[in-house]
Structure formats: structure tokens, C-alpha cells
Amino acid sequence: MSVITILMAGIMSVTGIWSRWDRHDGNWDELAPLLAANGYDAVFYMAAFGPVIDEEGLRECLDACLPLGIEVHAWVIMWRIDYVPGVQLGSLHREERLQAYSDGEVIWNWLNPTDPRNVELMAETCLRIAAEYPVTGIHLD
């Protein structure tokens, strides 16, 4: 390994955690100081599960982490629609925007990633997060 590679690894390293909204109890005011005190400098917060944005949780995470110098990256779970309200899910199904097996059986919690309308929906979700929240970046999963 060259000296430049070693130096760049030190400059560009990230010490962070991933945090899912469905597994977190909203204690960012307690968690963020612990992270900062122990050398963590990034949080990858599950800001969106498919097109559903966790606005309250993302705001809490940002408000607690940014003042302590902890970057917040919006983690976006692409194509999954587990948290889409039933009315919208029915509409997506009627519009044939869900994935399906080769025999035609619908996969109810996945958008079809080859449908341009779904690509637009997910792009709009990411653009909305970038425009409305001071995140450091967006992590697509």
C-alpha cells in the first residue's frame, strides 16, 4: 500500500452507525452525545422506506446529531413499500406498478424498479429529502 493510499484512508474514513426508524425509540438526545464522545462521526438514518419518509425521526436525528458534528446521511430503502398506506397500495396494484413473479403472482411489498413511474417516485422521494433536510448525503439501498 502506498503512503498516499494510507493517508487518504485516514482522511476519508467514516465511523458511523445505521439506524432504522422501526427499531429506534426516539432517544436521539441521549444517543447523539454518546456517539460523539466515542468517536462516531456519521449516522445513516433510515429516512425513507420506499416513498414513505420518516419526517419526525429524521428531524430528531438531525437536530441531535448536527450540533455535535455528526453527519447524517439519509438511508433510503429503494422499491420497498411495506409502510405505504392501504389506499395508495391499492392504487399501485391497479396501475400494475408492483413486482410480480413470472407466473403473474404479485409481490405486494415491492415496486417494480423497471417501471418509469416508480423510478420517478423514488427520485422525487430522494430529491424531497435533499431539498427539505440538511442531510450530508443520501445512501440508496
Image (spheres, rainbow, N blue to C red):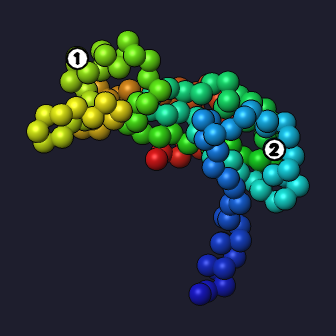
Q: Is residue 101 visible in the rendered structure shown here?
A: yes
Of 53 and 24, nearer the camera is 24
Query: Which residue is label 1 attached to?
Result: 94
Q: Position of residue 124 (x, y in %)?
A: 44, 27
Of 93 and 47, nearer the camera is 93
Residue 25 found in image quarter? top right
Of 39 and 109, nearer the camera is 109
Indicate the secondary structure of the residue bearing disc 1: helix
Q: Is residue 115 visible in the rendered structure shown here?
A: no
Which residue shows up at 61% across the image and 78% down it? 5
Query: Which residue is label 2 attached to?
Result: 31
Given the current orientation, which residue lies at the most extreme top position?
87
Q: Is residue 53 left or right of residue 99?
A: right
Q: Position of residue 65 (x, y in %)?
A: 78, 41
What amino acid type is highlighted by mark number 1? Arg
Of 50 and 23, nearer the camera is 23
Which mark is on residue 9? none
Q: Position of residue 23 (x, y in %)?
A: 63, 40
Q: Position of residue 43 (x, y in %)?
A: 68, 47
Q: Is residue 120 left or right of residue 68?
A: left
In this picture, is 140 found above or below 87?
Answer: below
Q: Is residue 126 left or right of residue 6?
A: left
Q: State how far apart marks 2 and 1 are (Cα).
A: 43 Å
What amino acid type is highlighted by mark number 2? Leu
